[in-house]
Image: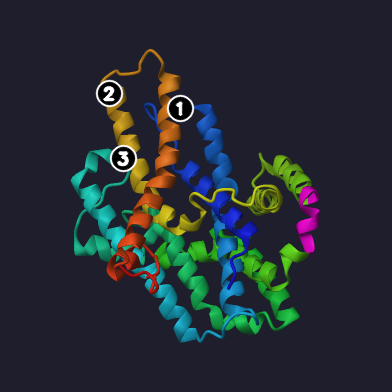
Amino acid sequence: MKKINWLLILQGWTMLWVVIGHAPLRIEGIVPEFAALLYDIAYSFHMPLFILISGYLFYTTRLSASSTKWSYKAIMMDKLKRLAIPFIVFTIIAMGMKSLLPGEMNRAASFTFQEFFLAILYPREGPLLEMWFIAVILWMFALTPYWRVCLKSRWLTIATLTILLALHIWVDYLPLDTFLCLKDCAYYGIYFFIGLLASKYGFDDKYKPMKYLIIAVGATLYLCLWNTDIQFGLAMSGIAISVGLAFILDSIYPKAFSTFRDYTYQIFLIGIFAQIAVKIIYKYILSMGLGASHPTLVYIVFYLTCIALGLYIPVAISKVAKYINWSPILLCLGLKKDSNLTR
């Protein structure tokens, strides 16, 4: 299936904000105001948008009439291979890092079977907190039979949308914890379903001509909701701004984020490790008193470096892995083997 360019741009934009969200460096526990603001902006919408994109792509590539008919078994085997293997591999890598460098990590971890087993059952409490996203997406794919039935009925679609919104709003009152990320599924399920609906009803064909209006309305709502607790409204307005920007970039600069947008999943998996390395170096620079005369400049340099390496170290590793084209390495990185590549 031909790739949708505005969606590729949107993926790149979203991944940039994920990396920005992981980038703040702490100076004695304090983050400078500009970095704190960017952090707050990132976490107001970037993961809901990431999950919405997953829903959009899933409908387009697996559920739509134009996609090749996929059986439930084939879908789950494909998703388990691409998601579960990297989940296990990078959980083990994080366990090893945190065991070797306990003083440099925010959360300690031991390199034991018990730690690994708990990380599978409680991804948010594991050595690599970011793995919660993979657990949630796997649950969303596991619900494929329901999505197929639901999307055939307008009334069932409306009922599902209502229930998911209610779960999102009142998630803190549900008897759920971090076990298998069920609470996160209740919170983020609404975004995945909206992504399914946006793809099913051809959102881009209908609303792309209204891109400037989408940004204007989204930006107005975002500013109005910024200091409120209406998280769904804030996230959706941030998503609207992002989609409008992707539509605009698609028409004036279709290659936007092309240097990394094809490797968003690999950036998600690997980027945090590159950023941890930058933060450790920054910490030692401060401990040695280097750059004390220009602390703001030093911070900005390391902050930007943290973002750049978080994006491009994974890209470099992925390109090397694709060049080697060896299945075990590709599986660990969530990449597909190129059967046409021969040497």
Q: Amino acid at mark 2?
A: Ser
Asked if residue 329 is among those painted magenta in the image, a careful observer would answer: no
Residue bearing the label numbered 2: 287
Residue 168, above or below 157: above
Residue shown at 41%/80% (left/top)?
A: 77
> What's the colour scheme?
rainbow
Q: Amino acid at mark 1?
A: Ile
Of residue 253 and residue 120, the one placed in the foreground of this image is 253
Q: CA distance from mark 2 to mark 3?
A: 15 Å
From the viewer's perspective, tell me whether residue 203 is left or right of residue 109: right
Residue shown at 25%/60% (left/top)?
A: 115
Q: Are marks 2 and 3 in contact (CB under 8 Å)?
A: no
Give the quarter of the figure containing the N terminus: bottom right
Place residue 340 in its image quadrant.
Answer: bottom left
Name the residue at the top extreme: 293
Task: Indicate which disc, 2 or 1, sits on the residue closer to the N terminus.
Answer: 2
* Bounds of the magenta segment: 206-213
Task: Indicate which disc, 2 or 3, sits on the residue closer to the N terminus.
Answer: 3
Residue 57 position within the rendered picture, expressed as x and y whole percent measured from the top left? 58, 68
From the viewer's perspective, tell me whether residue 296 is left or right of residue 217: left
Residue bearing the label numbered 3: 277
